[in-house]
Every structure is written in structure tokens, then in C-alpha cells.
Amino acid sequence: MKLYDGGRAPNPRRVTVFLAEKGIDIDRVPVDMGNLGHKSAEVTGLNPLQRLPVLVLDDGTALSESVAICRYLEELYPEPPLLGVDARDRAIVEMWNRRVELHLLASVAAAFRHTHPAMKEWEVPQVAEWGEANRPKALAFLELLDKELATRDFIAGDRYTIADITGMIAVDFMKPARIDKPEHLENLMRWYRAVSSRPSAKAA
């Protein structure tokens, strides 16, 4: 297998952290997204949406979308389980990962892509009003998450899962998106400190 990797961008990083938690080593093809390497003919041939990461299997199948890649790897390397251990647990993990994707990561990404000057050539049209509208959306979801984390250690239950990976990366992405971390949300910040201190959080 070969992983076309976009470095510290949120979705490539989700797979990088997932791999580190699993202890999986995969050959990587680094792609310089800053120089629009993801729009190259090679990457476009693997993923017409020109997004990273892309996992190319031994038979030539190209898998894109970070969660799809993680699902494939979970099937090959089930331990430790990061997508759930049974039907109920898998559904809960999916539910929370999807909520974090839609209501936090997507809002932070919209704020970044639509307001940051460096994204002017990437996000066409860049709509500043939409970016600004997403800042309070992200913070509102973090308030909800803070209440949920009053009763458990991790987002989807008592065990670290892909939902925590998505959440941690979304919170990290708030800095370049120019959204201040809500330090007053004690449960959220306790969770964030815990997941950020895991060795996988520093994986590259």
C-alpha cells in the first residue's frame, strides 16, 4: 500500500493519527499542498476531487476520504479498535464522529477557507460572510460537547476512538482559523489536554 499524504492539513492528519494509534507503518508519498501538489495530474488521476489523503492498495484501487481509509485499515488491523467493538458501539462512534465532522470540523474549515488570505486562490469564491458565520457555529457545538464530556472521558464513550481524533484535529485547526479556544469549558479542555498528550497527536 502507498499513502499520498498532505502533511498537517486536517484530513491527512486524521489518517496519520489513526495510523499512529494502530502502530501501522505505510509507505508515503508526500504531497506539497502549499504548492498545489494535490492538483497534479498524478493525484487527479487517483482522486478527481483533488483532495488528500489517498490510499492506493496493492491491486491499484485508490481510496480517498479519510474515514473510508480508516475503515479499511480497521478491517486489516482491528486492534486497538477505533471505530467500535460491536454493532451498538460502532453506531455510537459513527454518530459522534459524524457530528464532530459536520458541526465542528466543517465549521472551522469554512471559517479558515473563507476568511484566511492564503486561501483566496483555493476557495473560489471566497465568501467572508460565510466564514464569519461559521465561527459561532463551531463554538456552539463545543459548548454542547462540553456538556456531554461531563459524563465521560471521550467523545463517543469511555474509550478513545476516531471521534476523538476528528475532534482534536478540529480544535487544533481553530488556531489558523482564528477562533479562540473556549478555555472556560472545563470538560472540553480536560478532554483536549488528554487527547493532545497522546503520542499519536505528535505523529507526522
Image (tube, helix red, strand yellow):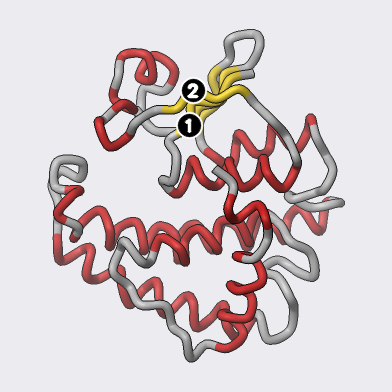
Indicate the secondary structure of the residue bearing disc 1.
strand
Place of residue 78 in the rendered image (x, y in percent of width and height, measured from the top left): 83, 39
Task: Tell me the distance, in whole angstroms, between the alpha carbons under discs 2 and 1.
Answer: 6 Å
Q: Is residue 174 above or below residue 56?
A: below
Residue 80: x and y in percent read: 82, 48
Dot 2: what SS?
Answer: strand
Question: Residue at label 2?
Answer: 29
| Vertical order, 150 against 198 (above or below) | below
Q: Amino acid at mark 1?
A: Asp
In the image, what residue occupies the spot 47% across and 86% down? 183
Quadrant assignment, res 35: top left
Of 54 and 90, the residue lying toward us: 54
The numbered dot on residue 5 is 1
Amino acid type shown at disc 2: Val
Q: Residues within 10 Å of mark 1 (few under 14, many from 20)?
A: many
Q: Are marks 2 and 1 in contact (CB under 8 Å)?
A: yes
At 54% from the left and 19% from the top, the residue drawn is 62
Q: Residue at x 51, y 30 (%)?
A: 64
